[in-house]
Structure formats: C-alpha cells, structure tokens
Image (tube, grey):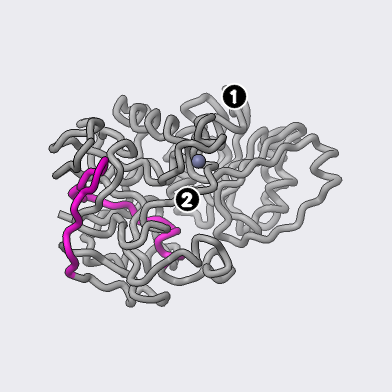
Amino acid sequence: MKAMRVPEFGPPEVLRLDEIEKPTPGYGEALVRVHAVGVNRMDVELRGGVYGKEALTDFYFGRLIEFPHTPGIEPAGVVEAVGEGVTEVNVGDRVVPHSHLSCGHCRHCRSGVDNACAQLRVLGVQTSGVGGYAEYFVWPARNLIPLPETVSFEEGASLLVNYGPVWFGLIERANLRPGETLLVTGASGGCGHAAIQVGKLVGARVIALGGSEEKLADLRARGADVAIDYRDGDFSAAVMEATGGEGADVVCELVGADTWTQSMASAALRGRLVVIGSHGGIRAELNLGELFGKNVQITGVTRANHATMAKLVRLAGEGLLRPAVWRTMPLAEAAEAHRLMEERRHSGKIVLTVT
Ligand SMILES: [Zn+2]
C-alpha cells in the first residue's frame, strides 16, 4: 500500500510517498481503508521537529517518534477486514477512529476521562508506523466510531481533532452557558472554527480574533458576533469594549504564549480560561495577582474523552455541527498541504483524499 512518510525531521519536501506492506488486523483490531485524512498542525510540527517554538524532542511524544514516521491523526474510511474477537464493527462500516489509545484501567480511564491517561498514545504520533497518511491503518475496533451516512469522509476527517478538545474544554470543563461571552483566540484555524460553532450551538455570544480583513469577514460569516483584528494591538481593550467592560466569561486559548497575557486581561471576573493549544509558544508569564484578584480558573485540555468524541459524531450526523472543509487535496500533495498550513495561507481544514 501507499503511505506518505517522514524519513527524518525536515521541511515539507522530506515527505515521501512510500510503497509499504499492507497491515493485517490482529486480535480485536480492524483494518480500515482510508478515504480522507485531516491535516493538523501536529502533523506539520511532527514533520518539522518543532513544537511551538521549542524542539519537539524536548517533549515526551517527540522522543517517541520512530522514523520513517507515518503521520495522520484524523483519518476516515471503511472497515475492510477485522481480526479475531471483533464485535464492535463489521466489514463495510464507515468509521472514524477515536484517535488515541489509553490503558482502560487507571483511575482516569475508569472515571471516563481516558484523555488524561498516562499511557495515552495518539494515532499518527506515538503509534510506530501507524498513521492516517496511508491507504490503510489498523486500529482496535473498540476505538472506532461509526460515521453516519450524512457525514462525508472529508467532514469525518475534519471533526474530532478540532471539535473534540474544544467541546471537552468549553462544555465539560469550563461549563460554557447560554448568554455567556466566549472569546476565541486563533479563531481562523480548524479549532477556532469549531469553537465558534460550539459557542453558537450552546447560545453563547462569540468574539473571535483574526489577522486580516478577509479572515475577519470569514469569522463573521461563520457565526462570530464580533471579530477583532489582533494586529491592531492590545486585543483585550477591544474585548472589554465589546463586552461593556465586563470581559469574556470563557476564553478559548488556541494560540499560547503570544496571546496569553492579553487573554488573561480579557477574562471577566470568575472567567474560565481553557488552554487547548500552544503552537504560538508554550512558556508564558502568569500574573498571580490577576489570577486570584479576578477569581479566574485556568484549565488545560488534551484531546477529548471517548464519550465526547462519540457525542460529536452523533451531533455531526444530526447536522448540528458542520465541520467545514476549506480544501481537499490528494495524499500525494501532502507537502503542499503542509506548506499552506506552515505559511498560514489556509483558512480552515485541509483534507487529503486517499482513494
Ligand atoms: Zn488509563
């Protein structure tokens, strides 16, 4: 089978379309034929060897990468074969993977928060040789979620990596309520679009940050009630102005160090800050006086638990969530897809089509 692989850390050109052996499903596993796979910032950083502004090898998952590495956290496809002992899916089922593995028996897994498991292994990140940038992948059948007919493979490949942590962070952790104000930094990326949709779905007022006139118009078209250009300087002043001096009840922090100080300043009294990504730098200063003075809560989120992911697929099937695909490209053009993302020329989800 064909697989787009990373032989070593480097620029997009290192991506290489290799012919490798088609995998065979073992006990409890299914073989999935990939139709589409979402491109994520993580794929780009895994290839480049840099996370945010730091060397990827300084992180535990960076040290676990084995070359040649097959990226791809977010494939969608059809079950082509199953191994022994599989009862969860059948051949021919359309599926998306709950794309991390967890131990299943630690206290976090037992309490349903499997995304906090110490043994967490993410598909296409810490799964040696297994990733979505390929014609097939094998995955435990219990970690596959049926994809409704009403959701295309491209949409299925644009759903869980972005909506998963956004939903888990905003709804399950920050308890975003109808009528509250949600601020979304980095709103023009896939997670940002997801955050706008989730915010509007629960009845919040959404303020989104963008970096060009075109992107601001796009954020408004996607449902943002207010779009603010972060290039104009201190965005927290604009957030205060847009909220009558109150600030945002919930801040969805998708950038990191570059926006953190202003995100804190934008938070309302008793505001909740949800840190989902930090591709704009992982080391930020914290003003402890501001933290306790405003009664602020800060929460960090890694991915989403299985129950949330299954719920999101159901909501997408019912048309309540609509993952928007910005561009589809064939797998062979993965390097160009990475370039678009690295140079921030994209405005939403890029999906690679595989068949
Ligand atoms: Zn566990």
- Pointer 2 residue: 188
Q: CA distance from mark 2 to mark 1?
A: 23 Å
Residue at the image position 23 percent from the left and 36 percent from the top = 85
Residue at the image position 68 percent from the left and 45 percent from the top = 238
187 over 205 or under it: above or below: below
Residue at the image position 55 percent from the left and 59 percent from the top = 279
What label sits on residue 321 in the rendered view? Answer: none
Crowding near the residue tagged with mark 2, few <14, some 14–19, many ≥20 C-alpha atoms within 10 Å: many
Q: Quadrant of the C terminus?
A: bottom left
Type of amino acid at the residue the image marks with label 1: Arg
Type of amino acid at the residue the image marks with label 2: Ser
* Residue 347, picture quadrant: bottom left
Residue interval drawn in magenta = 19-46
Residue 108 place in picture, x, y as percent: 55, 36
Mark positioned earlier in the residue sequence (2 or 1): 1
What label sits on residue 177 in the rendered view? Answer: 1
49 over 129 or under it: above or below: below
- Say which element carries label 2: loop
Viewer-side residue, 336 vs 227: 336
Crowding near the residue tagged with mark 1, few <14, some 14–19, many ≥20 C-alpha atoms within 10 Å: some
Residue 112 place in picture, x, y as percent: 50, 31
Residue 196 visible at all: no
* Residue 89, picture quadrant: top left
Taking the magenta stretch, the answer to whether it contains residue 29 is yes
Residue 50 place in picture, x, y as percent: 51, 69
In the picture as drawn, the residue positioned furthest to the top comes out as: 178
* Residue 150, picture quadrant: top left
Residue 244 visible at all: yes
- Say which element carries label 1: loop
Viewer-side residue, 129 vs 132: 129
70 over 67 or under it: above or below: above
